[in-house]
Image: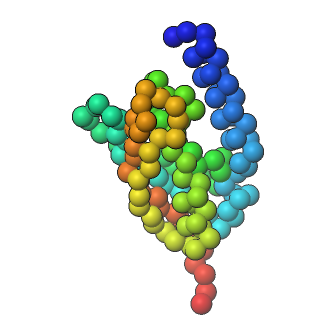
Amino acid sequence: MNNSMNSRKNAARMERRQRKLDAGFVEAQFPEVAGISIKMTYNQKGIQKSLPRVVNFFPGSSALFRIDCLSKECVDGGFDLTQVINGMVRNRRETAKGDLTCEGDGPSVGHSTIVYEVAIQYTQEISV
């Protein structure tokens, strides 16, 4: 790996760290949420085998809902589920499904994708 690539990866790592700090905690952003679970299947172009992943967020977790890309060549890539989760909480939805393409720079456009299912548990039921 050359110095230019190392420099880009270090800058991306610092940016991710700052975004995590800026996001705050789940309990502060969404006090009504007890937990968030993201089940996904990661697919990388040119690799036949899919990789299942589960990422859980708790009240004390960072409210940054961006999942890193697993491709070693990808710089500052990942899958941002922030809009999905914000919309779910706003509408008090418990599940959502979809797919996303990695947003990062990598060996080729669309080098990896995920199929996801988000489940949110709320702290209490709303009385109607």
118 w.r.t. 11: above or below: below
- Point out the residue furthest to the front here: 109
Q: Residue at x 65, y 68 (%)?
A: 32
Q: How is the image coloured?
A: rainbow
Is 102 on the left or on the right of 5, as rendered? left
Q: Residue at x 67, y 25 (%)?
A: 11
Is 18 on the left or on the right of 68, as rendered? right
106 w.r.t. 62: above or below: above
How many callouts does the rendering have? 0
Q: Position of residue 118 (x, y in %)?
A: 46, 58
**Viewer-proximal residue among 113 and 64:** 113
Q: Is residue 35 visible?
A: no
- Point out the residue furthest to the left here: 48
46 w.r.t. 114: above or below: above
Q: Is residue 8 visible?
A: yes
Q: Quadrant of the C terminus?
A: bottom right
Query: Which quarter of the figure has residue 125?
Result: bottom right
Q: Position of residue 47 (x, y in %)?
A: 28, 31
Is 30 on the left or on the right of 116, as rendered? right
- Point out the residue furthest to the top here: 2
Q: Position of residue 76 (x, y in %)?
A: 57, 32
**Viewer-proximal residue among 117 and 78:** 78
Query: Which quarter of the figure has residue 92?
Result: bottom right
Q: Residue at x 47, y 61 (%)?
A: 119
Q: Residue at x 69, y 33 (%)?
A: 15
Q: Position of residue 121 (x, y in %)?
A: 53, 65
39 w.r.t. 43: above or below: below
